[in-house]
Image: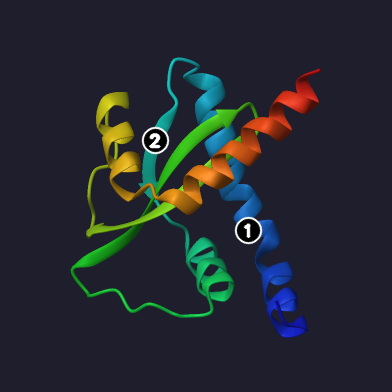
């Protein structure tokens, strides 16, 4: 990552952290849930573009969403979904899980395994 990319991410960090905190609170309020789908914040969209090195254009009738999986308390993995604009994302667990698995890939599974190992190490 270039120094400019680091600076850009640092500027977005507080806004992204606030949205990430909403995921943590969601899973605390609903301990039986492991997945959720929500609209991505503008800060998250900008951070994704910086990290991927490419700004994706989304059609006017589409929206960026995140499928979130609760790996452990305070550890969530977020995957990007492009879907219809203004979709009601109040999905039940089984549907949120299906959407998450739809966009899951080998790289995400590897990150998830690393997150689980770190969480297990912290729990000891």
- Residue 46 image label: none
> Mark 1: few, some, or many residues within 10 Å (few <14, many ≥20)?
some
Which of discs 2 and 1 lies nearer the camera? The answer is 2
Q: Nearer the viewer, residue 124 or 73?
A: 124
| Marked residue nearer the N-terminal end (2 or 1) | 1
Callout 1 secondary element: helix
Residue at (22, 49) in percent of width and height: 87
- In the shown orientation, is residue 11 left or right of residue 16? right
Q: Nearer the viewer, residue 52 or 45?
A: 52
> Mark 2: few, some, or many residues within 10 Å (few <14, many ≥20)?
many
Q: Nearer the viewer, residue 56 or 46?
A: 56
Callout 2 secondary element: strand
- In the shown orientation, is residue 121 left or right of residue 29? right
Q: In the rendered view of the protein, which quadrant contains the C terminus?
A: top right
The residues tagged by marks 2 and 1 sit, at their Cα atoms, a distance apart of: 20 Å
Q: How many marks?
A: 2
- In the shown orientation, is residue 114 left or right of residue 6? left
Q: Does 31 appear above or below 85? A: above
**In this figure, which residue is indicated by the disc labeled 1?**
15
Q: Give residue 112's position: percent from left, percent from top.
A: 55, 40
Q: Does 17 appear above or below 48? A: above
Residue at (29, 62) in percent of width and height: 63
Q: Does 8 appear above or below 108? A: below
Q: Give residue 105's position: percent from left, percent from top.
A: 40, 50
- In the shown orientation, is residue 102 left or right of residue 40? left
Q: In the rendered view of the protein, which quadrant contains the N terminus?
A: bottom right
Q: Give residue 60's position: percent from left, percent from top.
A: 22, 74
**In this figure, which residue is indicated by the disc labeled 2?**
36
């Amino acid at each position: 990552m270039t120094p400019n990319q680091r600076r850009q991410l640092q500027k977005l960090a507080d806004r992204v952290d606030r949205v990430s905190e909403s995921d943590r609170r969601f899973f605390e309020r609903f301990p039986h849930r492991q997945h959720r789908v929500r609209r991505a914040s503008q800060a998250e969209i900008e951070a994704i573009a910086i990290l991927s090195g490419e700004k994706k254009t989304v059609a006017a009738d589409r929206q960026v969403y995140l499928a979130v999986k609760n790996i452990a308390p305070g550890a969530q993995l977020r995957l990007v979904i492009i879907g219809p604009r203004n979709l009601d994302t109040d999905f039940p667990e089984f549907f949120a899980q299906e959407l998450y698995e739809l966009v899951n890939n080998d790289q995400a599974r590897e990150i998830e395994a690393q997150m689980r190992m770190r969480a297990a190490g912290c729990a000891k």
